[in-house]
């Protein structure tokens, strides 16, 4: 064999890892195998989210005949727990356990609550559809309780799981870890959408019970595997030591500076990117005449753009770029994308519309990764859980509110336009949709204004760990106040 063959092999060995999306996310404290196993909690969260928002939404309205307004209310109930993510993160920061764990107990209790909600949900839905001789109020209470339990479990698992990943990874690897966990959430959503579609065809009530309860068991097992031997146990804890209250911890976090602006930017951007969530497919079908199969592909375009955005953001931030600057680029991409989607109606261009959808996903990926990483890096070493919880609370609450408001704005404006109240030029079904897209563009420019000073402030040196130990080990050795991915 020629010497040049060995040279070529060495070059391929160097190039290969760089081509792998998350090869640079691994570290000595969090090897690739351990990281892949840890990311399974995001896969289970994605599967559960698709079940609630997509599959059950359609099954309850079409197959079970539940009124759409009641379905919307039930699906929105999990958002009630979104503001509590900050409190959940704080509790996992300051939790004292005889076993020496802080994060794992919260993840496991969240998984148990989610399991309980999913286990009782199919029977509650069957009663809700009218298949009962008892009082209907009992079906409302049972269905609401099951959705609330699933929402509480999802928010707990995701918030504390992301905090644990931050504990285990060194700071220079955290952008890549965040990107990988975000992509795994999308992977779980794809797996769930395809799996539920196959398992529920043809539909029967027995299949619905089996699928939902199978999801309960699957997600609980995946979470158990994901958390197995992940968090190192800390020996010799003083369980009598005084822990700061939530108010004290929040004041300490805000004392770091810029947190009001940071969370405002995250909320505005999340609101802007989420108003169109329920409108893109109807817009393609009603305005551009796309078929059902064509509009179904829009989800794949959006998810594909989001994955590319997460990957690119993780790579760029990992090389030292400012995460707030990346978030600003994401907001700018979103503004351009919404302009393209709005122009697709007057130009009757399906290609422009599809390109805009993919660019929306790309911009949302950049923005979510940038704001999440920015919050992680700005948090003190013993308050990462609180910081991630605050980001998650703002992001989920604003996204849920935008989801509801987008549909309301579209219906109200379209109704006025069709009656001629807005003038002859605006008398068309596209007016309501375009109004929503223009509103999102305005909100994204407001997001840029909010995030701008953070970019200037972030030119200082990036905080680095004080040693080569992982975050959890550093805190357990150095901090008297114990430190406690959508």
Image (cartoon, grey):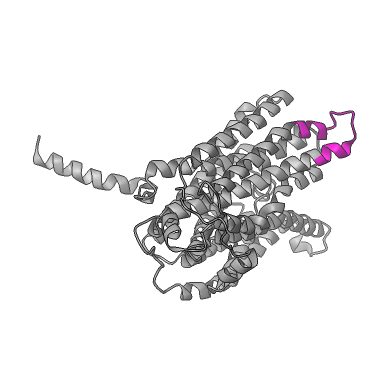
Query: What secondary structure is the stretch in magenta mostly built from?
Result: helix
- Between 339 and 455, the residue placed more toward the observer is 455
Q: Where is residue 146 in the image (x, y as percent from the top left)?
A: 73, 40
Left or right of 360? Residue 65 is right
- Between 426 and 251, the residue placed more toward the observer is 251
Residue in the picture at 62% in, 27% down: 199
Residue in the picture at 41% in, 61% down: 317
Q: Where is residue 236 in the image (x, y as percent from the top left)?
A: 47, 53
Rendered image quadrant of residue 113 = top right
Q: Is residue 135 magenta?
A: yes
The N terminus appears in which quarter of the rendering? top left
Q: Is residue 295 visible?
A: no
Residue in the picture at 77% in, 37% down: 61
- Between 420 and 6, the residue placed more toward the observer is 6
- Is residue 342 shown above or below 101? below
Q: Can residue 205 be seen in this view?
A: yes
Left or right of 213? Residue 309 is left
Q: Which residue lies furthest to the left in this view?
A: 2
Q: Where is residue 182 in the image (x, y as percent from the top left)?
A: 51, 49
Q: Where is residue 391 in the image (x, y as percent from the top left)?
A: 58, 60
Q: Does the magenta stretch include residue 381?
A: no
- Part of the protein shown in magenta: 123-141
Count of numbered tags: 0
Left or right of 70? Residue 402 is left
- Between 63 and 107, the residue placed more toward the observer is 107
- Is residue 312 shown above or below 105? below
């Amino acid at each position: 064999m020629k010497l040049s063959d060995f040279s070529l092999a060495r070059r391929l060995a160097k190039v290969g890892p760089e081509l792998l999306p998350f090869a640079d996310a691994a570290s000595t404290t969090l090897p690739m195998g351990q990281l892949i196993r840890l990311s399974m909690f995001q896969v289970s969260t994605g599967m559960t989210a698709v079940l609630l928002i997509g599959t059950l939404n359609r099954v309850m309205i079409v197959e079970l005949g539940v009124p759409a307004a009641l379905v919307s209310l039930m699906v929105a109930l999990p958002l009630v727990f979104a503001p509590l993510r900050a409190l959940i993160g704080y509790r996992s920061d300051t939790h004292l356990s005889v076993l020496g764990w802080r994060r794992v107990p919260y993840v496991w209790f969240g998984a148990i609550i989610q399991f309980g909600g999913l286990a009782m949900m199919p029977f509650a839905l069957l009663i809700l559809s009218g298949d009962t001789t008892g009082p209907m109020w009992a079906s409302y209470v049972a269905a609401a309780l099951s959705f609330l339990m699933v929402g509480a479990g999802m928010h707990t698992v995701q918030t504390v799981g992301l905090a644990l990943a931050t504990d285990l990874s060194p700071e220079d690897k955290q952008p890549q870890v965040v990107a990988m966990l975000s992509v795994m959430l999308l992977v779980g959503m794809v797996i769930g959408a395809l799996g539920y579609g196959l398992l529920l065809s043809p539909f029967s009530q027995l299949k619905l019970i089996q699928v939902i309860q199978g999801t309960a068991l699957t997600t609980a097992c995946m979470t158990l595997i994901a958390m197995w031997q992940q968090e190192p146990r800390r020996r010799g804890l003083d369980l009598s030591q005084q822990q700061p209250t939530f108010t004290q911890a929040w004041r300490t976090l805000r004392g770091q500076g810029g947190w009001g602006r940071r969370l405002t930017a995250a909320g505005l951007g999340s609101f802007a990117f989420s108003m169109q969530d329920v409108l893109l497919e109807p817009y393609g079908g009603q305005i551009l005449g796309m078929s059902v199969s064509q509009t179904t592909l829009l989800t794949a375009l959006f998810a594909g753009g989001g994955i590319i955005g997460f990957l690119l953001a993780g790579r760029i931030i990992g090389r030292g770029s400012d995460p707030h600057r990346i978030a600003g680029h994401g907001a700018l991409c979103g503004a351009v994308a919404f302009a393209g989607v709005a122009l697709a109606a007057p130009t009757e261009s399906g290609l422009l519309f599809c390109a805009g959808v993919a660019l929306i996903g790309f911009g949302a990926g950049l923005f979510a990764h940038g704001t999440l990483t920015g919050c992680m890096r700005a948090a003190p070493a013993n308050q990462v859980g609180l910081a991630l919880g605050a980001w998650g609370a703002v992001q989920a609450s604003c996204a849920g509110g935008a989801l509801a408001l987008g549909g309301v704005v579209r219906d109200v404006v379209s109704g006025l336009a069709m009656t001629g109240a807005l003038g002859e030029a605006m008398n068309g079904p596209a007016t309501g949709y375009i109004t929503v897209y223009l509103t999102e563009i305005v909100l994204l420019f407001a997001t840029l204004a909010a995030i701008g000073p953070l970019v200037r402030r972030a030119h200082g040196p990036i905080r680095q760990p004080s040693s080569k130990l992982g975050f959890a080990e550093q805190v357990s050795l150095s901090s008297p106040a114990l430190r406690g991915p959508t």
